[in-house]
Amino acid sequence: MKKRVLLAAALLPLLSGCGGTFSTGSLGHMFSGSSNISDYNTPQGFLVQAAAARAKQEATAEIALKRTHNPQLRAYAQHVLNDAKADDPALAALSKTYNVKFPAPITPEDQDEIDTLNGVAPAVFDKFYMDASMNDERDMLDMYTAAANRNAADVAQYAQGQRVKLRSHFDDAVRLDALVGGQLYEPYNE
């Protein structure tokens, strides 16, 4: 966590020239998970969180496709977006079963993070996107792992099935983050 906050603080001077308003509070959250594992133990709790995470995941991938000039990051963002959109019908069906709204609106907190990502200086965009993506994929892996282990059978089966894709996304993000100069994250331990 200290490394994440230090990175956020180090990026502030670079971000300040972008014309946006940034605070250490919003940056600090962008690099730290805020979800509570106990929220994933009920079908509704998991599906609400999964739908919100999906909305953010798709939005950040779309920003990366518009902003990055790195072909490897572009391919990663497209892969994440394709996987998310391919899974949307399954998540929508489960959400309907448990009377959870899908697609979910982007939360105000996530919108702040998306706005921050969208406003970051071009010189640091790739690094910032990969750090945020790794954090989000790690949070999603934690959420889906918890749901796979402690939820209703249909939700647990869905969550378990998605973990392979999420793990692939996370591993790719770690590799790409190293490519753009990051060294913040250790491998994911299940």
Image (tube, rainbow, N blue to C red):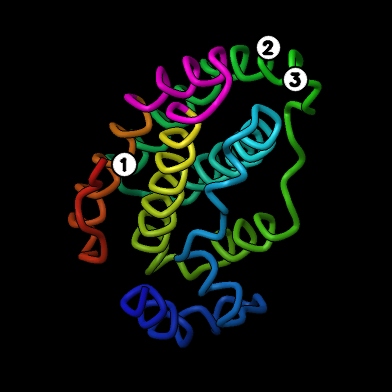
For the residues labelled 1 and 2, the Cα–Cα distance comes to 25 Å
Of labels 2 and 3, earlier in sequence is 2
Query: What amino acid is labelled 3 in the image?
Result: Tyr
Query: What amino acid is labelled 1 in the image?
Result: Phe
Of labels 1 and 2, earlier in sequence is 2
Numbered mark located on residue 12 in the image: none
Instruction: Determine the secondary structure under disc 2.
Output: helix
For the residues labelled 1 and 3, the Cα–Cα distance comes to 28 Å
- Point out the stretch of residues depicted in magenta: 148-164
Of labels 1 and 3, earlier in sequence is 3
At a point 67% along the width and 79% down the height, the residue shown is: 21
- 74 vs 34, left or right, is left
At a point 60% along the width and 78% down the height, the residue shown is: 25
Q: Is residue 61 above or below residue 7?
A: above
User: Is 155 contained in the magenta span?
Assistant: yes
Residue with the mark numbered 1: 170
Question: Where is the N terminus found, in terms of image quarters?
Answer: bottom left
Instruction: Determine the secondary structure under disc 1.
Output: helix
Numbered mark located on residue 93 in the image: 2
Q: Where is residue 19 shown, x and y percent of the image?
A: 64, 77
Q: Where is residue 13 shown, x and y percent of the image?
A: 46, 87
- 121 vs 127, left or right, is right
Query: What amino acid is labelled 2 in the image?
Result: Ala
For the residues labelled 2 and 3, the Cα–Cα distance comes to 9 Å
Q: Residues within 10 Å of mark 3 (few under 14, many from 20)?
A: some
Residue with the mark numbered 3: 98
- 152 vs 99, left or right, is left
16 vs 135, nearest the viewer: 135
